Amino acid sequence: MTVTTGAQGTPVALPDAWLSARGLNRQAVFDLATLPADILAMLAPQADERQLILLGHGGRRLWDCVLESEIGGADPIDDYTQANLARWFAERLPGKRYRLLYPGNVPIGLQSLGRLAGWHHATPFMLGIDAHWGTWYAYRAVLLADTDFPAFSEVDRDNPCLSCAAQPCIAACPAQALGGAAFDLPACIAQRLRADSACAFACPARLACPVGPEHRYSSAQMAHSYGISLAMLREYAARTG
């Protein structure tokens, strides 16, 4: 269904091929009135905001687009996403307004939104998994807007971990953080902070997962993403002694 009109009469609806071509190929939209009360309270919507739009990416396309853009910066993925989001509204949704919550300082339960969208099921190594993309996807933007799209989300696929008898991720974890009743976060962090750790710029448990290997990130993309989290862990360790 055509719900609004962009520049030069271009029909715009979700899912949107313009966003997908730029790597933002996971898209969901929720009417605010239908969201659970706890999520709605976190969002604190303004009077004219009617919908929440959740954008993400699956697979390698987004990273390729970021490299092609030569956008640079400390976090080029976030910068690229925000630049294309602004362009999407300006060119294809003129007159519509939005407020970006993520990336940003608003506390957003991304995994809760992912579960509502049908994107997220839990894994032993604490990443979300999808039966098509595996764990090779991420949340890229959460925004509130005065749009009037029909509510849309992907079909919720079953959790592939529930039918995975071999569970190779558990054996592949150098920190042995997955074998207990709960994920051992301190053991995971300690392993990542070791000199020459195999977990510094990749996760062996994640790499061992047999779901969606064709969508696996490149080593450069993994090094970028894990490098950001590793820097945060090192800074925290230095601050707390």
Image (tube, rainbow, N blue to C red):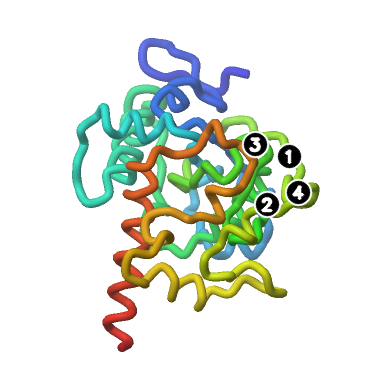
Residue 28 visible in the displayed image: yes
Q: Are marks 1 and 3 in contact (CB under 8 Å)?
A: no
Q: Which residue is mark 4?
A: 164
Point out residue 79 in the picture as x, y percentages from the top left corner: 28, 43
Write the residue at 32% across / 58% down. Answer: 228
Q: Which residue is mark 2?
A: 121
- Decide if residue 12 is on the left or right side of residue 30: left
Instruction: Please state, as top left, top right, bottom left or bottom right, where the N terminus lies in the image.
Output: top right
- Work out how far the residue at label 2 is from the one at label 3, CA to CA, in angstroms: 15 Å
Identity, as a three-letter code, of the amino acid under mark 2: His
User: In the depicted view, which residue is nearer to us: 88 or 187?
Assistant: 187
Q: Residue furthest bottom?
A: 241
Q: Which residue is mark 1?
A: 157
- Work out how far the residue at label 1 is from the one at label 4, CA to CA, in angstroms: 15 Å
Label 4 CA crowd tier, 10 Å (few <14, some 14–19, many 20+):
few
- Work out how far the residue at label 2 is from the one at label 4, CA to CA, in angstroms: 13 Å
Label 3 CA crowd tier, 10 Å (few <14, some 14–19, many 20+):
many
Badge 3 marks a residue whose secondary structure is loop
- Decide if residue 152 is on the left or right side of residue 234: right
Identity, as a three-letter code, of the amino acid under mark 1: Arg
Residue 143 visible in the displayed image: no
Mark number, residue 153 = 3
**In the picture, residue 233 is in which quadrant?**
bottom left
